[in-house]
Amino acid sequence: MKIIVLLKMVPDVVEELEVAADGQTLDTEFLRLIANELDNHALEEALLLKEKYSGTVTVVALDAPEVDDALFTALAKGADQALKITDGDSAPSTLSGAYRLAQALSTVPGLLPVDLILTGAQAIDDLDGMTSPLVAHFLRLPQLGIITQVSVNSVAGVATVLREFPGGVRGEYEIQLPAVLGIQAAEKPPRYVPVSRVQVAMKSRVIESVHVPTAADGGVGLSPVEEMLKPEVTEHAQMLQGSPEEVANQLCEVLAGRGLL
Amino acid sequence: MVTANHGVFSPPPPCDIGLDNLTQFPEGRRLWTCIQCGTCAGTCPYGDRMQYPPRRIIGMLRAGELERVFTSDSLLNCVACYACTAKCPRGIDLTGVLLPLVKEQVLLHLPEIPAELQKALENKLRYGNPMGESPRKRAAWVKTAGVPIRILSEDPRPADALWFVECYNSYYPRGQQCARATAKIFTALGIDFAILGNEEKCAGECGRLSWERGLYSTLMEYNMLVLEKYKFKLIVTSCPHAYDAFRYRYTALGFDYVITHTTPFLAQRLADLKPLLKRKTDCVVTYHDSCCLGRHSSIYDEPRLLLQAIPGMKLVEMTHNRVNTLCCGGGGGGMWLDTYYKAKGNERLSERRVKEAVATGADVLAVACPYEISRFEDALKVLGYEKRMIVRDIVELLADAMEV
């Protein structure tokens, strides 16, 4: 079985995000990038599937600061191949990023055909979870998102997947392979890889750089960011103090005072 | 000047010692002198929870069946407290040599490592601190210090003392109180000190004792390069785990700075410090010997001398003190295994310890390690003793006593 994992570098919110002087992008002075958490789940799910059914896992990422660390870590965890797509926009939108990934997948020799393309169901800069449906759209493949479990029947060419819904509801789907899946959570937490193994990977493995020329938006039209704003600071919470009865009375007064009772 | 080398233990183990070449080193060959008396397992705070206590691990090693230990989570119970090493009648350095080598293999072989520990290890690599805080905020506490603190990257003039503040005192609010107290005492004593600020990263905790050879060597190499940039006469650290790492592990990289911990550092300046301790107290204090500072480096008298220098303070001892101290449960990665221990039904070692502390009738549990503050304060709350006893770092008690 052949699996491709799409990995994206996103802003690390351990550092406070600042809006750049242009008012439209993030200030990159202190910005650090980190592999999207759910993409790490997609990688873990791919590695679990590889362990279960055998096969290969190829990790594909758009070039970005610190992406090499993320790709070597993926190789150290058990991925077979790591590919970095260079010469792109330094801060692609979800749409242009998905378009470039799809373009790379279909133009780089040896990547397709594939059984599964996995990526995170969401990213901190893609809360709508559009990467996997967009990639599927560009590649004309079936897609399902918010997936928490995958099993494959390669003879029948289908995968059975669990999709999460709000309220604890889960749906079981059968999807034709090849397919694109947006992974919400791997069946096990992403594994730990000891630093020494990453260091060995850095010495013994290679990240293949692939030049894919930038094609702005695939003709689907960009929605440029007009303005980026920091969240407004609202009033602080009001702490009610006293005995349970006093607190209950105060709470009733607050609710009544605002016309909520 | 400062004599850094207290301690009863043999020199640090060679860094290239491994499970495959143990017999090439005297420290490794000692394992074959084990008489299987089981003192190690008996003195281990979690010996009863281990499928493979130290005695059995040596037995498995000698029988050529050590691999079975790698796939068991038994060694997750090892809190690197040096109790087995201190008590071994054959002088086998279990904590320093064999256990870390086996732990390293456990980390490679366990199908899943506890999430909290994994996160702490990943955070130390990426951010240089286990909490996952921004490395750019490491020196943020300095603004609240109340005294000027020189940061070497901004003012690289030579300093007498390089103060290695470490993670908990830099980021954790209770730790920051200790950092402020330390700064206040250093300033009052007229010590020419400076810190690395945001350039500092975790020293690597107890290095190899915390599971991850690659992680600790990455941190060690980083900190060595930063230290080489500046000139100072000695390093004083607030963290016994960093002290342990510098003194016993960094030597493999050519570390030959004088290294000390705030407690012995201040005890050596007791003559200057004493006249500053003006505020009288009537509290009773008991002191918890940290494993790294106490059992591993025999720094037992210095903390007690400091406490007794505070006017009116009465010092009482717990049943387990000095070399018999009970680990707070935070060492060897235990700091990030509380959820795992809870799930396994282990008694929290910090709770075991505070029960003993409360039994002394003392009002204050004095500590010298930043791990212990949160561990013991939590344990006091869990056991419902939070009104009977408070936890204070020695530097906090000293700084309080300086206020009139």
Image (cartoon, grey):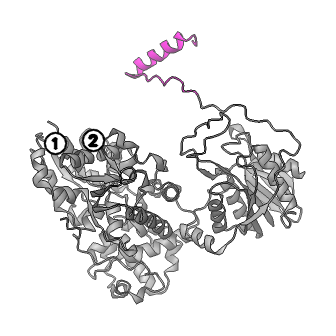
Residue A178, picture quadrant: bottom right
Outermost residue toward the bottom in this view: B24
Considering the numbered disc 1 on the image, is that residue within a helix, a strand or a loop? Answer: helix
> In the displayed structure, would residue B1 be above or below residue B379?
below
Q: Is residue A253 magenta?
A: yes
Give the labeled residue for mark 1: B401
At label 1, counting other C-alpha atoms closer than 10 Å, the crowd grade (few under 14, some 14-19, many 20 or more) is some
Q: CA distance from mark 2 to mark 1?
A: 17 Å
Q: Nearer the viewer, residue B182 or B210?
A: B182
**Residue at screen point 46% across, 71% down:** B103
What kind of element bears circle 2?
A: loop
Q: Residues within 10 Å of mark 2 (few under 14, many from 20)?
A: some
Q: Quadrant of the N terminus of chain B?
A: bottom left
Mark in the foreground, 2 or 1: 2
Q: What's the residue type where badge 2 is placed?
A: Val
Q: Position of residue B340 (x, y in %)?
A: 47, 57
Give the labeled residue for mark 2: B147
Residue B308: percent from left, percent from top: 12, 52
- Quadrant of the rendered image containing residue A45: bottom right
Q: Is residue B375 left or right of residue B367?
A: right
> Is residue A54 a member of the stretch shown in magenta?
no
In this picture, which residue range is highlighted in magenta? A232-261
| Amino acid type, mark 1 | Ala
Q: Residue at horizontal 52%, vertical 79%?
A: B67
Q: Residue at x 45, y 75 (%)?
A: B101
- Depth check, front residue: B320 or A83: A83
Q: State which tag comes first along the sequence, 2 or 1.
A: 2
Between A227 and A260, the residue placed more toward the observer is A227
In the rendered image, the quadrant that contains the C terminus of chain B is top left
Answer whether residue B360 is visible to the viewer in this image: no
Q: Position of residue B154 (x, y in %)?
A: 39, 49
